[in-house]
Amino acid sequence: MTDPIRVLVWNENRHERQNPEVAAIYPDGIHGAIAGALRSAGLDVRTGTLDERAQGLADLDWADVVVWWGHLAHDEVSDENVDRIQARVLEGMGFIALHSAHYSRPFKRLMGTSCRLKWREADDRERLWVVAPDHPIAAGLAEYFEIEREEMYGEFFDIPTPDTLVFISWFSGGEVFRSGAAYARGRGRIFYFRPGHETYPTYHNADVQRVIANAARWAAPGTTPQPTFGNRAALEDR
Amino acid sequence: MTDPIRVLVWNENRHERQNPEVAAIYPDGIHGAIAGALRSAGLDVRTGTLDERAQGLADLDWADVVVWWGHLAHDEVSDENVDRIQARVLEGMGFIALHSAHYSRPFKRLMGTSCRLKWREADDRERLWVVAPDHPIAAGLAEYFEIEREEMYGEFFDIPTPDTLVFISWFSGGEVFRSGAAYARGRGRIFYFRPGHETYPTYHNADVQRVIANAARWAAPGTTPQPTFGNRAALEDR
Amino acid sequence: MTDPIRVLVWNENRHERQNPEVAAIYPDGIHGAIAGALRSAGLDVRTGTLDERAQGLADLDWADVVVWWGHLAHDEVSDENVDRIQARVLEGMGFIALHSAHYSRPFKRLMGTSCRLKWREADDRERLWVVAPDHPIAAGLAEYFEIEREEMYGEFFDIPTPDTLVFISWFSGGEVFRSGAAYARGRGRIFYFRPGHETYPTYHNADVQRVIANAARWAAPGTTPQPTFGNRAALEDR
Amino acid sequence: MTDPIRVLVWNENRHERQNPEVAAIYPDGIHGAIAGALRSAGLDVRTGTLDERAQGLADLDWADVVVWWGHLAHDEVSDENVDRIQARVLEGMGFIALHSAHYSRPFKRLMGTSCRLKWREADDRERLWVVAPDHPIAAGLAEYFEIEREEMYGEFFDIPTPDTLVFISWFSGGEVFRSGAAYARGRGRIFYFRPGHETYPTYHNADVQRVIANAARWAAPGTTPQPTFGNRAALEDR
C-alpha cells in the first residue's frame, strides 16, 4: 500500500484514571504512548477509549488495523462491538491484542478458546526469544530482547496453536510463555503480543514499540481475494 | 482407555420428521444411522435430539465425545448449551461436527470464524482424497473414497487453518473443499467432516461410517495434564 | 526493501533445445518467459541455466530469491550446488520451486521427504482455488483461476505439511493437489507452485505470472534477526 | 495394534566406552537404560549400536519405531543407512531423535534444515512445560516436569516449525527451547525430545522415560493408507 496504514489504537483507559502510579507512567494513557510510537514509525494513527462515544470505536470502519488494550472492563464492551470487530477482521482488518487483552471479548471471540493463563505480579525479568527469524514481526530485532520488570504470564495459555509462533518468553520465576502468536482468520490477520502490564513502562521500550509497529504493517490488508459465500452454479458440465 | 469410548450422537432431527424423502432414507433418524454404525464399531453410544429434554444434552457430562448434526434450527440451541459444550471441549471432550454443522453454534463458537462456504444441491459426485496418510482418522481407508451423489461444499471455507488437514474433496462441478479438518483446542479435540446432506444415504456409506468411528476414537480424552490457570507463586528464587 | 528484489531465474533448459514443440512455446526458454514477466513486475532479474558456467549459479550469492525449473536432469545438479542453495536459504534467501522442480535436488533436500506424487499428461483442465485469502502470494487474484490444459499432479504429494497452504487444484480427471505450499526454513522462505508443464504455454498465463511475482516478493529476505549457533555463556546468575 | 510395538533403541555407544563418568551412570549404555524403561512399559525392544554388525541396524526392517541417540560419530553413519531410515520413515516407521541426535544424519535428512542450536554444559536446571495438553506424548505427566541438572540447548533451533509443539523448556541460565517437536512425514511420524546429555542420569528420570514410551506408542504405524505414486489414468471422463 502506498498510503500509510491506518491504525486505531483502542484502550480501556481506566487504570490511567484510577491509579496515580499508572498515570505517572502513561500521562497520555497507554493508547497515547502506543499511538506516539506508531506515528513515529510512519503510520496514520487515531485513538479510541472505552468511555468515549461509540465505546471509542467510531473510527472502526476507517481502520486497517486495530490495536487493543483492556483489563478491568472487558465485559463492558458491547455485543454489537464484538460482532463488528469479528466481522471486520474476517473481511481483512488486522487485530493486535496486547497483554491483558488476551481476555478481551474480541480476542476470545476470534480464538474460540478460554484464553486463560497463569500469572504473577512480582517484578519478573522477561526475555523474549525470536523463534521465527523469517517473520516480518521480528524485523530489526536482535535474537532476543529483555524487559527488566514485568508481570509473568505462564503456560498453559489456552489459545489455538498459532499459525506462526514468533516469540517465546523466559521469566526469571521459572515459567515460559508463547508471547507472540500470529493467526490468519478469514481474510484478516491477528497478532497477540504479551508484554505490557500497566504498572511498568513497557510501552516506552523501543523493542516493544518496534514489534507493535511491525505487527501493524504485517496485519494490514492487501489485495488478496475477498471470499464470497452461498449458492453457486456448477463450473463444469457433469 | 480400556472401557469403550462413550459417544453422544446429537441430531437436530427435524428434516426426518418434516420430509418423507429424508425419513425414508433415515427411518431411525440420522442419529440412529450413525449410532448404529458406531455401536458396530464397539463404541458405547447414546443419542440426543433437539426436541428432547435438555435439548438432547442430558448426557453431555457422560460423553467422551459428541457427534453433532444440525441444519434448520441452529439458532434454537441455547446459549447455555453452547457454553457447556465449549467448556467441556476445552476440558478434554471430543467434538465431531458433521456436514451442515459447520454452521452450528457450538462449532462456530469453537472456531471463532464465520464458517461460511459455497454450496450447491445438484447431485455432484464427491471424491475425498487422504492428504494426511499417517493420521488415525484415515485408518483402514484406501487413498481416496467416493460418494456417488452429494451436496457440493466449496472453498473458501472460513475456518481457522486446520491443525491437520486429513481430507480434500473433489466435486464433479469443479470445486474443491477441505473436507476433514482436525483441531486441538484446550485439552480437547475437534474434527469437522464434510459429507452428509440429509437427502442422500451418506451415513449408510461404509467409508463414511469408518471415518466417524475413527474420529471418535481419535477425539476421546486420554490422560494428558489438565491445565490450570490463575495466580501462581514463583518456582525459582530470583 | 527500497531496491528492487534480485531474482535469479534458473532453468534446466533442455526440453527447449531438444523438443521443437517446447521451443515453439518458449523461444527464449522457460527462464526467458518467467524473467520477462518478473521484469515487467519491477523486479531485478538474471537468468542461469544448467549448461552454463557454474551450472548457471554464478549469481547465486547476488540473488535475494531463486526461481527453479528442472525436469530431465535433476541428477546433474552437483552436490556442491545443492549444499550452497540449502545454506543460502537457511540464511535468508527465498526459493521458489516450479512444477517438476518438486523432484529437484534442492527442493528434496529442503523438504526432507520423497516429494513424489501422481501424474498424467492428458490435457486436464486445472482450476486453482485460493484457500489462504490473507496471503500475499494470492494478491490481485480472483477466488480461483483456471489453466485450460495442463499436466495433472495428484495427491498424495509427499511433502511436509505446508506452513501455509495457499492453493488447492481441481483437475478434470478427478484429482486434487496442494498446488501452492509455503514454508519457512531457517531465516528463509520456500514456495512450491505446481503449474508449468513444458508442452503448455502456462508461463505466458497472466495469473501464473502474477503468482510467481508475488511469491518472489514474499520470499525476499527482510531485516529479521540472523540466527547464531554454538556455545554460549549463561545470561543469568544461577 | 494388539501385538506390542517393536522398538529398536539405537545408540552410538562411544561415550560409555571412553568416559568412566558416563559408564558409571549408564553401565548398560544409554541404550540399555532406555531399553529397560521401554520394556517395563510393555514394548517389544531390541537394541543396536554403531560398532555392531550393520552399524547396529540389522533389525531396522523389524522395527515399528527407532529411538536414536548419537553425538561423537554422526558422520560415521553410512549414506546407505541414512537412506534406509528415511525411506522407512516415509513408509510409516516412527523415528524418535533424542538430545544430541538433533545433529544426527537421519534427523537432519528428515528435517531438511541445519538443526543447529545454542548450547552450554553448566549444570542448568531445566523445566519442561506442556504446551499441547491434548497430545498423547504428554499422557500421564503433570503440567511441567523438572530435570535438576542438564546441558542447556537454546533458540534459535533451526528445525521446520513442528506440526505440534509439545514441550517448551525453561533453563536457569536464561534460555528457552522447543523441547518436544512432533512431525508427520510421509506415512511416518517423528519426534524430537531434547533431554539426555551423557554426563547426567537423565534417562533414569521417570518423566523422561514416560515421554519416550509415550512417543514410541504415538509414532507406531497404524492402518492408514500407504501412498502410491506415478502415472495414473483419469478417474473421470472429460
Image (tube, coloured by chain):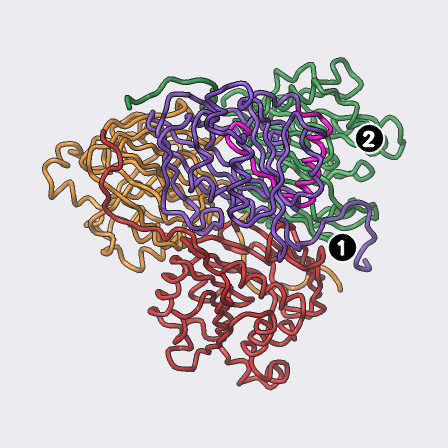
Chain colours: A orange, B red, C green, D purple
- Work out whether residue A186 can be spotted: yes
Q: Alpha-carbon neighbours of circle 2 within 10 Å: few (<14), some, or many (≥20)?
A: few
Q: Alpha-carbon neighbours of circle 1 within 10 Å: few (<14), some, or many (≥20)?
A: many
* Camera-side residue of D2 and A15: D2
Q: Which residue is mark 1?
A: C172
Going by the numbered disc 1, the residue's amino acid type is Ser
Q: Start and end of the magenta stretch?
A: D77-101
Q: Residue at x 49, y 66 (%)?
A: B3
x then y, percent, for residue C181: 61, 40
State the image quarter where residue C117 is shown: top right
In the visual, does A97 lie left or right of B199?
A: left
Q: Which mark is residue C72?
A: 2
| Discs 1, 2 touching: Cβ within 8 Å | no
* Camera-side residue of D142 and A71: D142
Above or below B94: residue D77: above
Q: Which mark is residue B103?
A: none
x then y, percent, for residue D72: 57, 20
Label 1 vs 2, first from the N-terminus: 2
